[in-house]
Image (spheres, grey):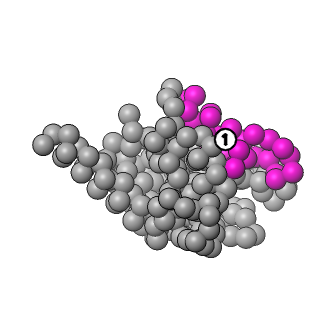
Amino acid sequence: MKLIILDRDGVINEDSDDYIKSPAEWRPLPGSLEAVLKLKNAGYRVVVASNQSGLARGLFDYDTLFAIHDKMTRMLADIGTHVDGIFFCPHGPEDGCSCRKPGTGLLDDIAKRFGRTLSGTPFIGDSISDVQAAQAAGATPLVVRTGKPVDDSAAELAGVDVYDDLASAADSLIARDKSRAHKKGG
């Protein structure tokens, strides 16, 4: 079973410094939903792992978060695909939880739920905290430029592949998988 983990805000949908606080504010990035479809068609189980500190900050409640996720899943269903799970941290940065990235709690939960280690599992994020969480959990971090500004020269990004968007990251992973399969078969 191939597994891939995606951050939500800035990877699948447009991010906002003011937080995504309603379904109306949740807008997919160009090509991101189609990238999920490509990953699913290539045999990946696609899971979302997202910090949602807007809950702790009182900017929205659980019903609103679930409505946002319902919008995302409906839009994915409209193109014939889905995600295999959505994991989120409801805590704020000062709460000291283990699930808030760069902590590994969300990723540990995903590993447990899917009955596997995350060694070599791609985790596509848009921030240094995503990279740090992936590395600490043994996953392989990838970064997209569609969210927070990315400084390619940052020490934390040494050896990390950086892509323009989720679509280009997905295409690269799928091409790599095909190349590996071809080498094994040839």
**Residue 43 spot, x, y in % from top left:** 33, 42
**Residue 67 spot, x, y in % from top left:** 64, 52
Neighbourhood count class around disc 1 (C-alpha, 10 Å): few under 14, some 14–19, many 20 upward: many
User: Residue placed farthest to the left in the image?
Assistant: 186
Q: Amino acid at mark 1?
A: Thr
**Residue 174 spot, x, y in % from top left:** 32, 53
Magenta-drawn stretch contains 167: no
Residue that appears at 57% across and 36% down: 110
Whether residue 144 sits left or right of residue 68 in the image: it is left
Whether residue 55 sits left or right of residue 24 in the image: it is right
- Which residues lie in the magenta part? 87-113
Residue that appears at 66% across and 41% down: 104
Up the image or down, 76 lies above or below 121; here it is below
Residue 9 visible here: no
Compare residues 122 and 114 and report the one nearer the observer: 122
Q: Which residue is mark 1?
A: 104
**Residue 172 spot, x, y in % from top left:** 35, 59
Up the image or down, 44 lies above or below 26; here it is above
Compare residues 138 and 78 and report the one nearer the observer: 138
Up the image or down, 151 lies above or below 11; here it is below
Up the image or down, 69 lies above or below 115; here it is below
